[in-house]
Image: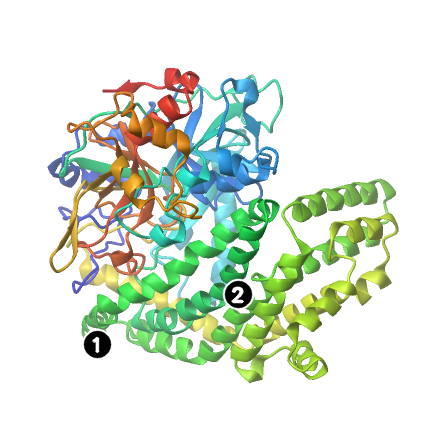
Amino acid sequence: MKRIILSLTLALLVLAPAASWADEGMWLLSLIGKNYPDMQKAGFKLTPQDIYSINQGCLKDAIVGLGEEGHPFSHFCTGEIISNKGLMTTNHHCGFGKIQEHSTVEHDYLRDGFWAYTMAQELPNPGMTASILVRMEDVTDRVLECLSDDMSESDRSKAVSNVGIRIIREATEGTDYEGVVQSMFNGNQYFLFVYCIYKDVRLVGAPPSAMGKFGGDTDNWAWPRHTCDFSMFRIYTAPDGKPAAYAKENIPLKPKHHLPVSARQLKSGDFAMVMGFPGTTNRFVSSYGLKETMDVDNPIRYDVRTVKINILREQMASDPAIRIKYATKYAHCSNYWKYSNEQNIALKKLNTMAVKQDIEDEYYDWALDKDPKYRQALPAIKQAYADRREVHEAILYYEEGLLSGPEMLGQAIEFGESIKAMLAEQNLDKRDQMLAELKEEAAKFYKDYDENVEKAVMAAMMEYTYRHINVNYVPECLKNADRKYRGDFTALVNYLFNQSFMSNQDKFNKFLKDPNLKVLERDELYKYGTEILARGRQINSTITKESRESLRKGERDFVDGLLQINSGRRLMAPDANSSIRLTYGNVKNYDPRDGVTYHHYTTLDGVMQKEVPGSTEFTVPERLKELYAARDFGGYVDADGNLPTCFITTNDITGGNSGSPVMDAYGNLIGLAFDGNGESMSGDIDFEENLQRCICLDTRYMLFVIDRYANAQNLIAEMDIVR
């Protein structure tokens, strides 16, 4: 956004002609025609209809939003279909959880990789979903006609929900589709998205983690990069082509479109576009919201997670079984641990606070002679953030340090509520079903759980939270424990686990043979969990309804004002919200600091140069070293005979874009987006056009690994490879 007021239009950019700004923007597909002249200047060779059409197969039909059953629209990653048999690629770190679930000490797919050489060898993943966009529609007028300025925020939310339900029902009734209505520009616009959601997604292939996670935490959010960050899945349907849960008789998806895979040379300046499901950006946040992010959210998240990460590193290094069990948990914790720290560094270095304040100064000048709601917007936002500062900080400690950092307190609450519901059920058949579901839930949880690891994590995080949270918000149970155990939180945790039937699977299964409400209510882990949750909710409730509503209304009116100020100046995309978007730019190097230039691509030479034998982050498999020594690259080399590994572009991405296809001017797959660079970690809040880079796996490295490393010729044969 820089020091220029945001350029947005409430009329969905129908005012003409407007210009886009640098490479910033996660664009809505149905409006991409507005960007077409700018895309052509950047080198795009197709048409808007080749990107989005409801009448013919197009690029959108090859883009997949990855989710979980029960909340499929919260896409955790993106994938792309690369064959006419539903073969799909995404990042290794996106498939990591599924690879881990299938791994055992005897069959360690995290360590060794996994390859299915026939479809019969592909592994099912119950609960994983793959969503493909059918169509989208602007429904702003239908939603806004049900709203008024004198509504309370709660009444407004109910009205939006009710009209959204009607819109979705009309769009999906009598079909196999599902829909969602999503807000844009802080509630100033609304879009309907209709998806076909597939529920049989099977693991096909993945390189060893030594390659798929090469560089680990050290290289995360950094360039140059040499990570082979891909995994492969296949989408299946019922025999009639409709979405269906896993069944042996299911058949591979026959997609409307799949992406050809490029093995061509990439040059600096080449056109590059990314389509995917970016999670969340906050480009319109005020300076007051930014201050909370920098002073509260990022430091607390980083500091608390540092405690957990240090324990997990030590425990995982001690035992292969623990390493497998905690691999996914560690990855989830560490990713935004580093991000929080890197983002603050970038925000300070780029002086983003001054950027926000400049925008607000111009907004204040504009609002002087406008409706009072615009003049009141920023003061209301400022007051709301000030009012909630202490409480927001405390709640973050509860979330990071007590309820989601250690697993067992939150899990004890979930188990307890399921047990209570089961015991209250009078229908014996239904009760038996609930018991079976509870056993299944427990088996899944304890599979990736170690009692001693959890005790170490819980003791350390309880102590850290107790020592650092504002004393006024410490839960009473921790105060009592501190007095009783004289600050020895290890002794406290040992007591809790000794007095709980949930502390390990054997005790839990024994309880389920004769479940008893009184035993549950006396269970110490359950008691501590419920007391901490209740205290957290009580603290959270001290933020008044009026303050919450004032903040929401103030932010909506502030963005509405920016829309009016900048109408027609240039095209602008709404914040990311896990809906499908397109971003375009170019392959391009950058200068991170004085005297340093980063080239736009890396090669396998860098993998060998980075090797640290015995390291958990920079280990090179012997098979890869053999192929490198023999220069056996299978024809996937650059003009100098080197094997490219990764490259960078100016595309505007964020979390959720992981695994997104990076396409050339003709819609061929040239890479998989998997990261951003540390110098621009401010990007979710303020796009920095000179530094922002999207880090991508080069498809030539991916093809080499499938072809030469894994000898998976069955997969190579499926693809349309463009040379």
What separation in Å lies between label 1 and label 2 (alpha carbons)?
42 Å
* Apparent side of residue 600 relative to residue 557 in the rendered image (left or right): left
Q: Is residue 52 above or below residue 467?
A: above
Q: Is residue 1 above or below residue 290?
A: above
Pick the front one: 196 or 232: 232
* Residue 27 visible in the current orientation: no
Which residue shows up at 79% across the image and 41% down it?
433
Label drawn at residue 368: 1
Quarter of the image with the N terminus is bottom left
Q: Position of residue 62 (x, y in %)?
A: 37, 29
- Disc 1 marks a residue whose amino acid type is Leu
Q: Secondary structure at mark 2?
A: helix
* Apparent side of residue 217 relative to residue 391 in the rendered image (left or right): left
Lower position in the chain sequence, tag 1 or tag 2 = 1
Image-quadrant location for residue 28? top left
Q: Position of residue 644 (x, y in %)?
A: 25, 33
Pick the front one: 616 or 324: 616
Q: Residues within 10 Å of mark 1 (few under 14, many from 20)?
A: few
Q: Is residue 612 above or below residue 561?
A: above
Which residue shows up at 25% across the image and 71% down it?
353
Instruction: Report if the CB atoms under discs 1 and 2 are less than 8 Å apart.
Output: no
- Disc 2 marks a residue whose amino acid type is Glu
Pick the front one: 87 or 497: 497
Q: Which residue is mark 2?
A: 400
Which residue shows up at 58% across the image and 35% down it?
102
Which residue shows up at 63% across the image and 74% down it?
535
